[in-house]
Image: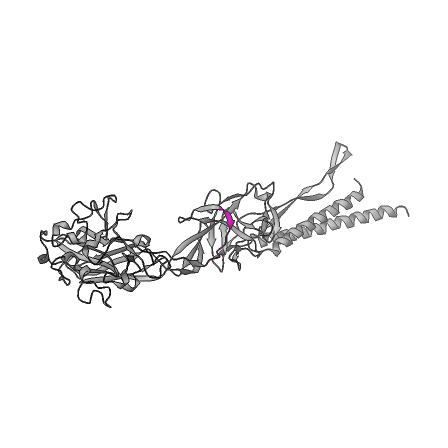
């Protein structure tokens, strides 16, 4: 091997050390870059030159070269972010991004996302974060799409169910009486044309609840209760307590029109349901009846013969209809277009096809003063909580309804499963999207695209997409960012080593040069 070859060997050492310094400097420059994955450089010796020796053939190396520069995909530390849309992956996976201009897909661990002016969730390059819409259980549905929350409002939902659990005082006095229909005396005394339809002293207890129509407007329902004196009816059961009840709304908001009559202009305006509750001596409810105004009623709408047994819902609960003024269907000619609302006192029927027992009067007018004609659900089922009648003051134990008005978005959150959830001013909490995570057969095959972005290649294999916490994919942390995984101490050590290698290689060149000069000087 000639002295000249030593010059090239030294040069190769300087070149590899220089490339090593380049990798180190890039790593150190990105020590604070979110989601950055450090590069690792490796070297190998180059070809060898054979020379003869006393023992046969020997080999002399001709220098070094870069063997590979690959990524270190170890987990970076998780640091606190500033927004709910700052998200980090703990474990395997990459967020999938899409360039909306050309459709190119990118993959990143840098989860510092924000919403743009069009409502798209984007990264710092305005590439759109990919995910799926979700169902009510947070499961992905439909095709993979760009996450966009362009409507910050929660639409209204009309009330379809009202639940009321009350205790009705078993020792209370009968306040509303009727010689002919004691079980419906409040209905008979109701006058929707008056400012106070039932007066102030014709009931024992009342409770109100706010409900909502299709447009999100609120309406107050009031349920009145009054005990029925044992002296006012016949064929009663000893020790039983009977309460009558009526479900009402503001007559001015009653948008029903029956038999050409606008109920808001009649004495029956605001009356939605009437019925009875019977309790045993222990205060437990034993029967319930419910009557509503039939859609083909005629004449005096407060006539008890116009009030027939109520329909029941699929849940076995008695239902009434309401059509509030201002709702889309407020001008309907009958109650078919009205809202069907189920009333839950904790009592239901297990037979929705034949909900009422055979001894239940078909209309409220047929009961009169006969307790035995009240009837009951045909297959009465009592819930774990139900209306009671103990010797204690009347009170509402709990009540609820399932409707709500429109609301605006208050905040977003991201779960460990990557589900993006919106909390709205109307109390609704809705799952909106779930983030898409991608994994690869070979991370080393990914190609860096700058900006902490990667693209898939033939060597990496196709992206395997899914949701967090499934398969090989890790989980998502909100209000968090993954830091660069650069180990500064190791990089500084490598930098010193490369500097020394560079110095040593340069010495080889200068030494070989001196030797050549000496050889040339022999000619003089």
Magenta highlight range = 143-151
Would residue 387 be seen by someone viewing this image from the given angle? no
Residue 69: x percent and y percent?
A: 64, 46
* Observer able to see residue 522: yes
Where on the picture, by quarter, is residue 261? Answer: bottom left
* In the image: residue 156, left or right of residue 78: left
Drawn side of residue 211 relative to residue 447, left or right: left
Give coordinates of residue 399: x percent, y percent: 27, 57
Q: Nearer the viewer, residue 401 or 18?
A: 401
Relative to 139, is 115 on the left or the right?
right
Outermost residue toward the top in this view: 56
Magenta includes 161? no
Q: Residue at x 20, y 45 (%)?
A: 378
Q: Is residue 203 above or below residue 464?
A: below
Which residue is located at x 21 percent, y 44 percent? 379
Q: Which residue is nearer to you in this view: 343 or 429?
A: 343
| Relative image position of residue 34 (x, y in whole percent) | 55, 55
On-image quarter of the N terminus:
top right
Q: Is residue 286 above or below residue 394?
A: above
């Amino acid at each position: 091997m000639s002295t000249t070859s030593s010059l090239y060997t030294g040069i190769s050492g300087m070149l590899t050390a220089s490339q090593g310094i380049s990798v180190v400097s890039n790593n150190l420059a990105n020590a604070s870059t979110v989601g950055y994955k450090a590069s690792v450089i490796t070297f190998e010796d180059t070809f060898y030159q054979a020379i003869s020796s006393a023992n046969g053939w020997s080999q002399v190396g001709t220098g070094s070269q870069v063997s590979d520069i690959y990524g270190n995909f170890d987990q970076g530390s998780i640091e606190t972010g500033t927004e709910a849309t700052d998200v980090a992956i703990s474990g395997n996976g990459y967020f999938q991004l899409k360039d909306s201009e050309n459709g190119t897909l990118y993959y990143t661990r840098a989860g510092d996302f924000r919403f743009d002016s069009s409502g798209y969730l984007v990264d710092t390059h305005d590439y759109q974060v990919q995910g799926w819409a979700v169902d009510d259980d947070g499961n992905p549905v439909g095709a993979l799409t760009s996450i966009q929350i362009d409507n910050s409002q929660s639409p209204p939902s009309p009330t379809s169910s009202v639940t009321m659990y009350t205790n009705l005082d078993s020792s209370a006095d009968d306040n509303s009486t009727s010689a002919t229909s004691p079980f419906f005396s409040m209905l008979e005394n109701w006058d929707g044309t008056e400012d106070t339809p039932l007066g102030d002293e014709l009931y024992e207890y009342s409770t109100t609840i706010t409900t909502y129509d299709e447009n999100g407007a609120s309406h107050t329902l009031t349920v009145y209760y009054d005990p029925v004196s044992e002296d006012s009816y016949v064929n009663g059961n000893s020790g039983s307590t009977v309460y009558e009840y009526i479900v009402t709304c503001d007559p001015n908001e009653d948008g029903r029109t029956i038999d050409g009559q606008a109920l808001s202009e009649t004495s029956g305006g605001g009356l939605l349901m009437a019925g009875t509750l019977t309790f045993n001596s222990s205060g437990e409810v034993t029967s319930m009846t419910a009557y509503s105004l039939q859609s083909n009623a005629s004449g005096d709408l407060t006539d008890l013969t116009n009030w027939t047994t109520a329909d029941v819902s699929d849940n076995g609960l008695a239902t009434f209809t309401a059509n509030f003024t201002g709702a889309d269907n407020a001008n309907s000619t009958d109650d078919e277009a009205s809202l069907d609302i189920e009333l839950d006192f904790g009592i239901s029927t297990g037979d929705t096809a034949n909900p009422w027992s055979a001894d239940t009067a078909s209309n409220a007018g047929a009961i009169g003063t006969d307790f035995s004609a009240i009837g009951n659900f045909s297959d009465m089922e009592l819930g774990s909580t139900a209306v009671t009648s103990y010797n204690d003051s009347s009170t509402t134990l709990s009540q609820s309804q399932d409707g709500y008005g429109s609301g605006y978005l208050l905040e977003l959150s991201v779960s460990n499963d990557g589900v993006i959830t919106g909390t709205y001013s109307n109390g609704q909490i809705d799952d909106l999207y779930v983030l898409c995570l991608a994994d690869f057969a070979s991370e080393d095959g990914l190609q860096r695209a700058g900006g902490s972005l990667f693209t898939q290649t033939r060597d990496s294999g196709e992206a395997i997409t899914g949701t967090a916490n499934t398969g090989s994919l890790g989980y998502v942390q909100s209000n968090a960012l993954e830091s660069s995984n650069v180990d500064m101490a190791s990089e500084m050590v490598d930098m010193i080593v490369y500097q020394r290698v560079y110095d040593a290689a340069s010495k080889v060149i200068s030494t070989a040069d001196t030797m050549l000069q000496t050889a040339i000087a022999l000619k003089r």
